[in-house]
Image (cartoon, rainbow, N blue to C red):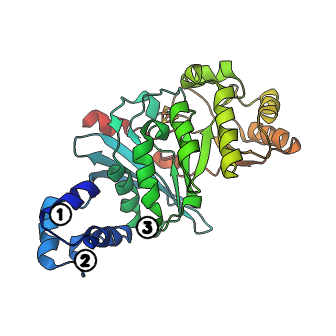
Amino acid sequence: MDLALLEQRLNDRAQPRYRAAQVWEWAARGTAGYEEMTNVPAALRSALADEVPFSTLEVAAQSEARDGTVKTLFRTHDGHSVEAVLMRYRDGRRSICVSSQSGCPLTCTFCATGAMRFGRNLTASEILDQALHFRRIEALDHCVFMGMGEPMLNLDGVLEAARRLPDLGITHRRTTISTVGWLPGLTRFVDEVEEPIRLALSLHAPEDALRSGLMPVNERYPLAEVLAECRRYFALRRRKVFVEYVMLAGVNDRVEQARQLAELLDRRVFKVNLIPYNPTGAFEGSSRRAIDAFKSVLDRAGVPATVRLTRGRDIEAACGQLAASRDAAAA
Ligand code: SF4
């Protein structure tokens, strides 16, 4: 729902100030449409239905994986494709992964989104509408900004959306914003965000040469500068930084590289998430054995590390697989 347009239309009708909050509360609770908002006058409900679309996004396609993961392809009013994912875990957690941009300008070599044409930054309402779509399916408790796009390139939109997530039942402590190390946005995030929103760094290599080969952003903002900013976040906020490390066979998964990584990361500050890679063309994923060997090095060095559960692989909803390519081509 375009919240600025909603306010404007309510002002045009000289509605009381609380009305926008009332409508938002209904939407955030997973209401399916204006008609269910019983404490809003009926005439106003029907006027709003005509003038303020209930969502800024249209659902273009939706699929469900064998493990219950749901991937939705949305279309913006101006034809851009956006994907988001709902992950269902056995312990009952319901986590969504939302996009901050349509496509991404940063072209990381292992990422399907990076290979897609960049569209534009999404508005805060377009980001929230991804979450609201899943909220209408079921109650949610976690959100990661790890879908399409680099959140720090669209920090205002991302923060405006993130700040409203508690109304949907997703607390700040269960909200994570991820970055590949876009320093201007990261610095602002560290300085300005006082809510306990979590920070994740997509690292993927323990040294600059390899990282620059995988992620061109590293040439602009090298590892040392990015890690220094993460340490500053920890010093100011006392919250650990999650390090995402996608496991690429023969590229970044050797035991020596695990040692390099352990040396790079202060165990008090960082927690590593090893991500089994979902092939998108250019690379092979590491074997389970290689992942286990890599993790043991980190374990021995005392660097907290886990291996991420892969969700939704059969519907290309897993990490690095969001591309909307076929559908974008058809748009
Ligand atoms: S990994 Fe993230 S920053 Fe890199 S191309 Fe993909 S979406 Fe963009």
Q: CA distance from mark 1 to mark 2?
A: 22 Å
Residue 205, horizontal then vertical, whole percent: 68, 29
For the image shown, how many numbered marks are present on the structure? Answer: 3
In primary-sequence order, the first of circles 3 and 2 is 2
Quickly name the residue at label 1. Answer: 11
Residue 313, horizontal then vertical, whole percent: 53, 47
Q: Secondary structure at mark 3?
A: helix
Residue at 32% x, 49% y is 74
Residue at 80% x, 29% y is 260
Q: Amino acid at mark 1?
A: Asn
In primary-sequence order, the first of circles 1 and 2 is 1
In the picture shown, does residue 152 fall above or below 32? above
Residue 296, horizontal then vertical, whole percent: 84, 42
Residue at 47% x, 44% y is 147
Judge left or right: residue 168 versus residue 285: left
Q: CA distance from mark 1 to mark 3?
A: 23 Å
Task: State the residue in front, 192 or 86.
Answer: 192
Looking at the rendered image, the quarter that the N terminus falls into is bottom left
Quickly name the residue at label 2. Answer: 36
Residue 178, horizontal then vertical, whole percent: 55, 43
Residue 328's disc is none
Judge left or right: residue 153 versus residue 285: left
Q: Secondary structure at mark 1?
A: helix
Task: State the residue in front, 240 or 83.
Answer: 240
Quickly name the residue at label 3. Answer: 167
Q: Secondary structure at mark 2?
A: helix
Whether the residue under disc 2 has CB within 8 Å of ligand 1: no
